[in-house]
Image (cartoon, rainbow, N blue to C red):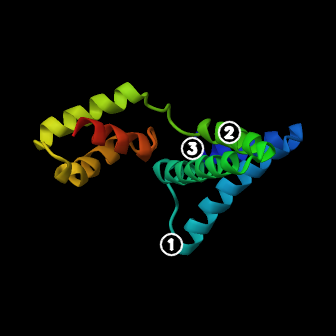
Amino acid sequence: MSLKQRLTNDLKQAMKDKDQLRKNVITLIRSDIKQIEVDKRIELEDQDVIEIISRQLKQRKDALDEFQKGGREDLVAQAQQEAEILLQYLPEQLSEEEVIDIVKSVIVEIGANSMQDMGKVMAAVMPKVKGRADGKIVNQAVKKLL
């Protein structure tokens, strides 16, 4: 079953269960998918849908930080719940150790040895971890190892 079909089925189930939060999150994902499909006149594959979900997850995490700074605990809880729902549609996330291992292998492969090579390393690592690791974690690992 494709990811788009799974989202459709989960939306129907959320409506039956009267799960308003899940319904809202899935509706936002589906509207982003539909918008891109209409604008570009293409049919999105699962990998493209994963990118959309990753982007929405990043937005929730950024908002979460801002809500915590502002002391809005009600919004913090909601953003956390939304992030948990989004994570269910992404491939299993890599642990920090796995990201470090990937970064180490890319550094050896490229022959990077200073911070000046950070762009090259990031460009090589990101396609390998796409949808499975946050860019911030990758960036920190590259900085630490270079």
Q: Nearer the viewer, residue 129 or 107?
A: 107
On the image, the x and y values in percent for residue 117 come to 18, 51
* Distance in Å between CA atoms under marks 2 and 3: 17 Å
The residue tagged 3 is: 2
Q: Residue at x 85, y 40 (%)?
A: 19
Residue at 20% across, 49% down:
115
Tag shown at residue 26: none
Proximity of marks 2 and 3: CB atoms separated by less than 8 Å? no
Which residue is painted at 36% across and 41% down in the image? 140
Q: Which mark is residue 85?
A: 2
SS category of the residue bearing label 1? helix
Counting other residues with Cα less than 10 Å from the Cα at mark 3, is it few (<14), some (14-19), or many (20 or more)? few
Q: Is residue 53 left or right of residue 30?
A: left
Q: Which residue is mark 1?
A: 40
Q: How many numbered discs, if any?
A: 3
- Closer to viewer: mark 3 or mark 1: 1
